[in-house]
Image (spheres, grey):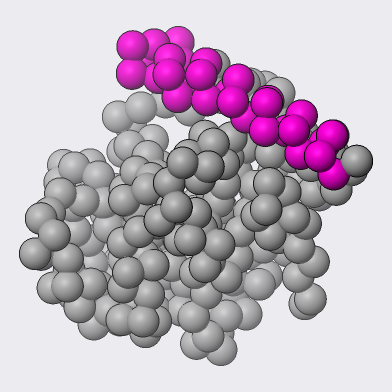
Amino acid sequence: MTMRKVEIFGIPVDNLSMDETLGVIDEHIRNRKPLHHIVINAGKVVAMQDDEELRRSVLAADLINADGMSVVWASRFLGRPLKERVAGIDLMLRLVELAAQKGYKVFLFGAREEVVRRVEEIWSEQYGPDIIAGYRNGYFSPDEEPEIARQIAESGADILFVAISSPKKEIFLEKYKDLLGKIPFVMGVGGSFDVVAGKTKRAPRWMQKAGLEWLYRFVQEPRRMWRRYLVGNFRFLLLMLREKFTRK
């Protein structure tokens, strides 16, 4: 399948549906061809304007999906419409189902120890213990990084989910991309382990479809999220307007 890319804010986003994305990933796993995946949303687009290391890490990814509806809406406003949103957590859950069907193994990396252990327990119960290649929490010192990367690389995993916040997640994956190349598919999943473990809740389906997940999270944690969403969304709007009229 030829992946058509749509450039938005200088980021080459893959214009694929969820099913098409899964097809590309499955093909790479079957052929043992490394594929580094990243999703972008409004917050990450804004952060990339100030963080050059994050920007390089995102642009170095092999497959980039639009995680947020804001990015999809921006693509339409800019006249370069993306097919649909491919939410990172939804893609992760579909990939776990695919792994169970195809006999692929998954490595879980990130979150607190009790959270990642709970995810391992839930998926082992649901799909059988053979689906898990290993797991490791996301708290470590820089000195531990090379050993962690080696542990993951030698686990026999076909899929690596990294539940670490940006930009640390993107930087780690880019830094150890060569070593982790033994694993066909590598994906950052942010706070998705917390949702699977039942620590946090996702917005209702209607809010997801309406692009209001950010509001749901803001209401849950206003003190922690106000800057990311209120300030970040305003900056994203300015970026979108600037790109629209600069291009013209």
Q: Quadrant of the C terminus?
A: top right
Give the residue drawn at x 36%, y 27%: 200
One can see residue 95 in this view: no
* 99 sits to left or right of 83: left
**Per the image, is 238 magenta?**
yes
Q: Nearer the viewer, residue 239 or 109?
A: 239
Residue 214, given in percent of the width and then of the height, sits at 54, 23
Residue 97, given in percent of the width and then of the height, sits at 51, 59
Q: Nearer the viewer, residue 62 or 21?
A: 62
Give the residue drawn at x 37%, y 39%: 191
Residue 119, given in percent of the width and then of the height, sits at 29, 48
Residue 16, given in percent of the width and then of the height, sits at 75, 59
Give the residue drawn at x 56%, y 89%: 31
Q: Quadrant of the N terminus?
A: bottom right
Q: Which quadrant of the structure image shows residue 161? A: bottom left
- Reply above or below: 62 against 55: below
- Reply above or below: 177 against 90: below
**Per the image, is 16 magenta?**
no
Q: Which quadrant of the structure image shows residue 235? A: top right
Give the residue drawn at x 68%, y 26%: 238
Q: Give the main secondary structure, helix, strand or loop, of the magenta stretch.
A: helix
* 105 sits to left or right of 37: left
* 142 sits to left or right of 38: left
Q: What span is in magenta?
A: 218-247
Q: How many marks?
A: 0
